[in-house]
Amino acid sequence: MVHTGQPSRGCAVCRRRKIKCDEKTPGCSYCVKTKQKCPGYGSQFDLVWRDQTVVAKKHVEQRIRATKDMRSQEDSAKRISLPEMRTRSGMYLSSLRPVPTPNSLDDPEDFALSFLFTVYAPPKYQSFRYT
């Protein structure tokens, strides 16, 4: 529920026309003067508090869809094969251990080892990077 501030307490006709309603019963002066049936005054609770359940659910579904799309793009990017390349030392890149992705570093020990190798190991011995 979201508090939307102090709303107009007028009848639906006056609120739609954005004019001051005198809130008389059974009908306001404007509705009587224009010879139309005054729709009455709604619940103050409904005017002040709005249920945001549907809106929140829609936002969550959009986030889930976006995450799935992003993951499918990452999966397709992983399938791209790169040409065989050599490092400066003459080693083929395919002979090196793969670089762990953030998802594979969920284990704190793997993350710590990755950081350790990145920061303290000479570049010649670094087989994966801290991400």
Image: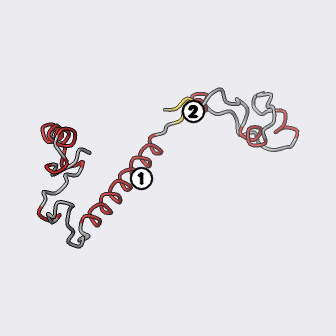
The crowding category of the residue bearing disc 1, from other C-alpha atoms within 10 Å (few below 14, some 14 to 19, many at least 20), is few
Percent from the top left, x then y, of residue 116? 17, 38
Q: Nearer the viewer, residue 27 or 93?
A: 93
Question: For the C terminus, which image quadrant?
Answer: top left
Considering only vertical position in the picture, is 129 above or below 15? below
Tell me the residue that label 1 is attached to: 62
Q: Quadrant of residue 41?
A: top right
Helix, strand or loop at disc 1? helix
Q: Specify the color scheme.
A: secondary structure
What residue sits 85% from the left and 43% below the top? Answer: 35
Sooner in the amino-acid sequence: mark 1 or mark 2: 2
Percent from the top left, x then y, of residue 1? 48, 32
Percent from the top left, x then y, of residue 112? 16, 37
The amino acid on which the numbered mark 1 sits, given as a three-letter code, is: Gln
What residue sits 17% from the left and 63% below the top? Answer: 93
**What label does residue 46 carry, if any?**
2
